[in-house]
Image: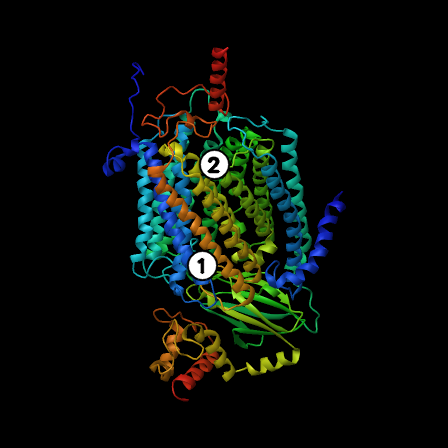
Amino acid sequence: MVRRFFALPAAILIALTFAGAAAANAGLAPVTPESPNANAIRQTYFVILAVTGVIFLLVEGALILFVVRFRGRGRARGQDGAQIHGATKLETASTIVPVLILAGIASFVFVKLPTIKNVPEAKAANGALQVKVEGHQYYWQFEYPQGQVAFQHMVVPIDRVVELTVVSPDVIHSWWVPALGGKIDAIPGRTNHTWFKAQKLGSYEARCAELCGVEHAHMIGWVDVVTPAAYARFLAAHTGASSAIGKEVFGGVCATCHGLSGQGDYGPPLVGNSTMTDRQGLEQLLRTGKNRMPAVGKDWNDETMQAATTYLKGRFGGGQG
Amino acid sequence: MAARVEPQPYRADWRRGGVTSWITSVDHKRIGTLYIGTSLFFFLLGGLLSLFMRAQLATPNEHFVTRNQYNELFTVHGTTMIFLVVVPILAGFGNYLVPLMIGARDVAFPRLNAFSYWMYLLGGIVLYSSFFAKGGPAKSGWTAYVPLSELQFSPGHGQDLWILSLHVLAISSFAGAVNFIATIHNMRAPGMTWTRMPLFVWSIEVYAGLLVVILPVIGAGLTMLLLDREVGTHFFIPDQGGNALLYQHIFWFFGHPEVYVLILPAMGIISEIIPVFSRKPIFGYKAVAFSTVGIAFFSMLVWAHHMFAVGLGWGLQSFFMITSMLVAIPTGVKILNWLATTWRGNLIFDTPMLFALGFIAIFTIGGLTGIYLAAFPLDWQVHDTYFVVAHMHYVMFGGSVFAIFGGLFYWWPKMFGRMLNEKLGKWTFWLMFVGFNVTFMPQHFLGLLGMPRRIYTYSNGGWWEAYNLTSTIGSGVLALGVLIFFVNVFRTRRHGQRVGNDPWLGDTLEWFAPSPPPPENFPQPVPYVSSPRPLRDLRLKLEERDARAGA
């Protein structure tokens, strides 16, 4: 009985997995998964889709059938229908059957849960990569085990387990890369964890999913899945106060409000802005914020701050110094 | 009642006297009418805000409104639709109908009733006055999550006015709820036991009970937020020892049952309309009544399913998944009972029935997508996306609002003595039904594609653009349907067909009163209630008597 109960959803699941792969990009199923946890979540989706699809067809089918079959056809309003007050057996069945269906769905969730929540055991030689994800108004900052800091783009090697520690120093954000698993909130005062293991090279969009203020829509990051060699190059380029970081800070942090070429948008233009010539003033502004500008650089380390101010002064403040 | 006075020919009480008579009235019918009229006005305002949002999202990188304005729009839209439209319009129906349905003269505390209406109006004025506040209205969504809604991140007075508005509205709802409970418990007509009470009255009883339990909780939470903002406490400020998650627990302990506050009386309306237009008794009266109680009970055990992404422990997440799924069971019972009520009936497709059937069709989808959200690993994908926006509108708009429109068409002749035009009514229904589905069905797909809610713009083309544009077009069709309803209302004032006490051949006592009812409601003594369908019993008895007289 139990086996038969699972047989139908399982068969539909297999059929839908193929249909789903084609339909994924049209939004009929979660986006194509590229990590084991995202994949297990999508399987859960298909099981629920199959079960609720059948219920949907039954209910809406019955509704249409009854509407057509029992329509008045000009019978007088005073003419009564069958005076049926209830049917205890049917009502009991209609309570028990949904319990069984829901128990089935819940069981499937519990079967899949370990694949989704447990971080896979990593091989000793090539252990899990630990990355700290910080949600800020309005950018993502990533910290690597050897102290490297990156903005907007999290670069990770392919086929390696990446364990994320997700935090926020200001308001609540939510880290979400649909292709690489579910979302997890970045909540001030709490430390949350999630993981992924990317199976395909490429760049995956990371959206902030919790309203975090005026630029919530533009709080977009990327997970760049690269080869191990490219990953090594990335780490090397992000050691110390390199100009790569300065450029990243501008693109990931400043440009959201001040425009991609510093032309001004929600924030004032950086081009020809007198603050850009004054390194101390700039650092002060980044550390504490002012009016509508959040304190974006409150927690930056000295290397990051130096890289940022050097880049901004160089690009908008007329040269080094 | 020592001396019986001959009933005088009366004018509809809403025609008597001017503005003053409305302001000073403690008549439940006038107050009900005020509630419904005010709610419909706010419905237009809130709807207008949503059309601005849909215009902004119609195409990528649109600049119809600014990012700040967009955040204000969805905050005020959500707050309006929940607190200024659906809750009060149901209170309006309750006010107008509960005394009539239980055969009473008025509610238990008429002055308290007037107080609760005027507090509601005040709450609405306070919310909309925040458009003139320093920094504009609140921008942190109808949920006002901390720390975003704290002073540091939401300066200005918009958020404070939002809190004040909700406080005032909570007082209004609380007074109303106490009044309903006292009325229903004490003032039922002779013979009307609990299992002979109209199902709408059952739903108002449960609605009021829920409000009494949950309103103090949100009152406390909002007070803490206000103190954080204005006095310098730090209940919710993490770097000063507060807890940001505490607010979410408080908010959703109120917020989830609030959803059922919005849907249960709507279900009550459906349970009144379907039997009358199927010419049958409701299938399983007790199951429908007790499932209302069951839904209300479970609704208080599911709040953390709004918080699956905050990193709760596995045990908690599993618990809240199971309780959330349990809500589906009494809900399923109701859908089965409504369907079974139409079985072998004599279905008459007047506008109220169309809205009731549309409710079943749409609410079923909203109920089923709830299972996706309850399964917590899947919720990590769809939480805070347009999938949730779609789900919530399938329940709140396709559910509650469709039922409310059905109720308006059904009880309009009772309230004003004139029928709303049926032809325009059918236009309203079909435009709303098609427009609703075109607006909100694609939003499920947008959510699965990865579109978060509450973003003011996007740059993705392709399917994102196609679905968003479709949704915006649908919202226009929906708005047209609503517009025709208001045309219908104004047309009916002069040209509507006049009707007698009981145009639909109803089952319940409100149809025993004249249309519109005089101040004392029932010029003749209410018949003894011996079943949930006293008026049908009376009709059959009169037919029998006529037949005997004829023979």
Nearest to N terminus: mark 1 or mark 2:
1
> Can residue B380 be seen at all in this image of the molecule?
yes
**Quadrant of image for the N terminus of chain B:** top left
Residue A264 in the image: x percent, y percent?
Answer: 39, 76
Q: Nearer the viewer, residue B548 or B212?
A: B548
> Can residue A144 be seen at all in this image of the molecule?
no
Kindly indicate whether the residues beneath marks 1 and 2 are on one polypeptide chain.
Answer: yes
Indicate the colouring scheme.
Answer: rainbow
- Pointer 2 chain: B
Residue A43 in the image: x percent, y percent?
Answer: 67, 57
Label 2: which secondary element: helix
Residue A125 in the image: x percent, y percent?
Answer: 70, 74
Mark 2 Cα within 10 Å, few/some/many (few <14, many 20+)?
many
- Pointer 1 chain: B
| In this view, A206 is above or below B421 | below
Residue A164 in the image: x percent, y percent?
Answer: 58, 66
Report the residue marked by disc 1. Answer: B54
Q: Is residue B418 left or right of residue A233?
A: left
Residue B180 picture quarter: top left
| In this view, A155 is above or below B187 | below
Seen at 33% across and 48% down, the residue is B124
Query: Label 1 vs label 2: CA separation?
Result: 30 Å
- What type is the residue that disc 1 sits on? Arg
Q: Nearer the viewer, residue B441 or B316?
A: B441
Report the residue marked by disc 2. Answer: B269
- What type is the residue that disc 2 sits on? Ile
| In this view, B259 is above or below B231 | above
Mark 1 Cα within 10 Å, few/some/many (few <14, many 20+)?
many
